[in-house]
Image (cartoon, rainbow, N blue to C red):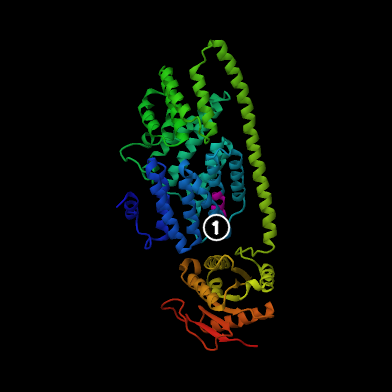
Amino acid sequence: MDDEQRDEAELPALDERSDAWLVGRARELLAIIQTVPLAERPRCTAEVDRLLAEAQSRGEPRMVAQLLRSAVAVRVVNNELADSAEPLLDEMLAHTRRHGLVVLQADAHALRGRRLLLAGAEDAALTEAAVALAMLDEDITPDVMLGGRTWDMIMASTLLDIGTVLTQLGVYEVADQVMTRAHKCIRASAGPHLISVHLINRARLLVGWGLRLERIGEDERAAERFATAAAIAIAVEAPFRESLFPRDPRSTAADQNPIIAAALALAQPSQAHEARLRGLLRASRYPRELVITSIALARCLEHEGREAEAVEVLGAARAEMYDEAAEPTLRLCLIREFARLSGPDGGERTTSALEHYATELEAQLWDMRESRIATLNTRREHERLSRMHSSIARQALQDPLTGLPNRRALDERLEALASSPANHPLAIALVDLDGFKGVNDRMSHAEGDDVLRVVAATLRDALRGSDMVARYGGDEFIVLLPGAPLPAAEAALRRALVAVSGLPQDLSHGVTLSIGAVSLRPQESAVRALARADAAMYQAKRAGGNDIVAISAAEAAPVAGAVGAGQAGDRAWVLPETT
């Protein structure tokens, strides 16, 4: 058995695993891949891809989106795999846009920003961050299908991905605001791993910010950032011990994570940090870890009067970072630190001239930073206004409660489909909720609204992307299935019926569907076809509900068909066409 076959045999069987297990295992692999040696990363990536394939075979849109996010993330944290992220990013954007998963769509833009930074495309990465922020600036209703805790975790992960892009770009003030927003979601619902990720990212932000402030002579403000980062480094110890990161339980987080160790050393440089930092420097796998750890170690050596050793450490890091496109702001901090400790051969006069030149250069760079923030805000506002304009236009054709197309959009779509022979046969179904009035009477209209939203999402997710689900009014929906013969349409609608009847009680409150389906006849008006679908729906409802009744010219007798084992009234009827 070769290595590839052995790896395949060691991977867990997936067909009997729960949806939650698939998502959780993908999160675990993302944590693992950031710490394992380079040779082991393809194996982790391959397992994430298997998890994604399993999720896609099950077809639940929210789970697929989360697995797509994991498959992209394991690639954008590694230069060697970054190119393979692009088609997955395209798929993630298309999937989240189709299913209205706005937060995960924003995350796709943030992840594309991280991918662009690996290629040195800073301006394009800034645009992606602006688009992601603009999407999250909208008034987003939490997805009841996900649950509150999962919703908060997805929102927090998206904000952390945006914050990472802004940190790498050196837009620290905005990154800090984004991280603060993420903190609110994490505080509400997150477990120890996401807390650890957040605290480590925040420490990294503060360390980079402090080093940047030093470059313009703001030493006191820099010291404040380092002190806060050190406090975070202490706070991360408890959640880190329960995180998904591979770790030695006998060692502290500072002994195992370069960012945490560097934060402590930069706040209080001393020889006490030297051995730890040297060990972590040898194990550093990412440019940010290399730069921050090297600068922290050099500061400790300088504190002990060992400037020559400090220069040697910085010089080695500088040589390794020479062709690195990522982390441009940190790379410049490293070069400055190397120049500061090296000193030119020309003595004090040359040093003074170089320092003067550096001051002017830093002033210009600081102005560029302000310009970058202005650019980010401008692009964010442009995206926000564009989305607002699109939203207004969309709202004219959208039901505000469910997000589905409304009657006006339905009429336009039906007319277009009916007039094009390429869309025929065209199946039309009218869907009515069984037991919905009881939900409103027993509970509240707010609960009823939640049921309508859940059923709408389930209907939409169970059908093809080319099918249209529209809210017809009250608790009635219309489904248009272009190019679907009536038997195929009935099979697709049965999947939707089963999906709704299988919803958890706390989401559906026992509501089921009665469905009437017809095939549009030549020269038949839309009004007539809808009237026939309505009559078929009432046949299903009179039979006890949770049924499908289809009217076909090819069948003249009722045909039984189960929609779920052991369910009462779970049969489909085929009625003869009437003139």
On screen, residue 164 above or below 432: above
Q: Residue at x 51, y 20 (%)?
A: 340
Instruction: Locate residue 338, reporting x and y percent.
Output: 49, 22
Does the magenta-highlighted stretch encompass residue 103?
Answer: yes
Is 3 above or below relative to 374? below
Please check the rendered image and state whether residue 316 is part of the magenta-colored stretch, yes or no.
no
Q: Is residue 210 visible?
A: no
Label 1: few (<14), some or many (≥20) within 10 Å? many
Residue 288 visible: yes
Above or below residue 54? Residue 515 is below
Q: Nearer the viewer, residue 156 or 110?
A: 110
Question: What percent of the width, then of the height, locates residue 250?
Answer: 30, 38
Q: Is residue 226 left or right of residue 468?
A: left
Q: Magenta stretch: give its range.
A: 100-108
Q: Residue at x 61, y 28 (%)?
A: 365
Tell me which secondary structure the magenta stretch mostly adopts.
helix
Q: Position of residue 574 (x, y in %)?
A: 54, 84
Q: What kind of element bears circle 1?
A: helix
Kind of residue sitting beneath label 1: His
Residue farthest to the front, as pictured? 2
Residue 241, image x, y percentages: 36, 42
486, 330: nearer the viewer: 486
Question: Toward which corner of the image does residue 18 lie, by quadrant?
Answer: bottom left
Task: Report the residue marked by disc 1.
Answer: 95
Please count the marks in the image: 1
In-image side of 547 versus 240 (left or right): right
Query: Which quarter shows the C terminus?
Result: bottom right
Along the viewing direction, whichever of 83 and 104 lies nearer the viewer:
83
